[in-house]
Image (tube, grey):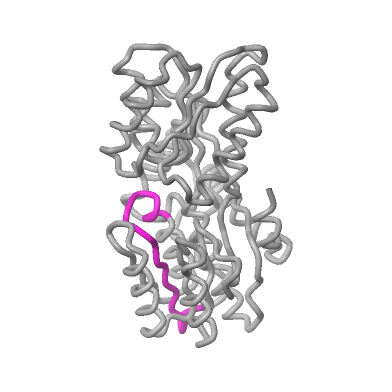
Amino acid sequence: MNIVKMITRLTGTTALTAATFMAVTGVGVTGAIAQEFDCSELTGASVVHFQGPYTKQLAMGAQAAVEECGGTYRSAGPAAFDTAAEVAAFQDMVLAGADAIVVVAFPSDFWIRPIDEAVNSGVVVSTFDVESPSSLASLHTAPKQKDQGVMMADVIADELDPDVSGTIVTGICLPGLALIEARVTGFDQRIAERLPNVEVIGAFDVKFDQTQNFSAWRSVYDANQGALAYVGFCENDLPSLVRLKESTGEDFEIASIGINPDGLDGIERGVALAAVGQKPFMQGYVAMRAMLQSIASGTPVPRGWIDVGPELVTMENVESITAREETVSAGYEDIRAFYANDIEVIFDDLPGSVQSFSDLLAQ
């Protein structure tokens, strides 16, 4: 779906003048935005921890920021989780002369040495998705993990009676991983505040792999039937929960963190309640543009955390989110336009948008 179709969904009209287009997207009709600064002599790179729809958008955001100011863009990352392969790809980018690299620092402690070595060699490094605050990385761009769990709890609580009693069953795709555990903590704490008569059971290990994920959720459901809701904290969970709910024919709420096409379809059809997105495009775009803009102007890159915020997807906005996601295969122009206002707010006052790492890590 191109951006005209997306705007048709958003505005309810096909009569799109240039003024209408610019009002909705924040950009002109002539194509990609050109930034006011020149980075044509710079190379920006992104390195992710695995290849998938989510990490594709992380990288796409970085690519958009590099190409808007005329720079050279490179990307790398292993097909599946492989920390050693990711570090090797990162080090190859350093050796190839990248000026700025944004990387998923998973796991955080393991990445301290590679990041510090790169920074000490003159490369500017920032992180997205997974932070490494003990390293010399300049920025981390992502929503706060705990906030995503809180947002998920609020949408569940809004749907249920405040005096309801029963259970909510949760699943975690990577037990022990701090950033996912933070989502669980935020969810559990908010449910306790808003639904005092509800017990949260879990989080059970539901695996990361999509096939294993569904099988795990099936087992969790079989052992914990009759819950008010089943909630996951990773992008593969909602498609599995949609299949599960439809196969059982039972009435319960389902939701998860992470945007997935099958999950969006489940929301649009009224099977699933909601998903909480992490704005991966924004994570990549903001980190890369902040680094290149600072390098090009000869000013220090800010150090700290930029909160791009989570986004809630429900029946009310699922059509516009689906339209946005359908444009990704054609390139980054339409998704860049979708986030134009958010980007403008951050870069109108970049120093003021940067919070401390202690703010990110505070519970």
Say which residue appears at 58% left-offset and 80% top-offset. 295
Q: Is residue 187 magenta?
A: no
Percent position (x, y) of residue 137? Answer: 57, 72
Compared to residue 157, the image places residue 141 above or below, namely: below
Compared to residue 156, the image places residue 147 above or below, namely: below
Q: Is residue 122 left or right of residue 63?
A: right
Q: Is residue 26 left or right of residue 352?
A: left
- Outermost residue toward the bottom? 121
In what quadrant of the picture does the N terminus appear? top left
Q: Is residue 54 magenta?
A: yes
Say which residue appears at 49% left-offset and 82% top-offset. 117
Q: Nearer the viewer, residue 309 or 341?
A: 309
Residue 147 in which image quadrant: top right
Q: Nearer the viewer, residue 33 or 150?
A: 150
Magenta region: which residues?
39-57
Percent position (x, y) of residue 302? Answer: 66, 71
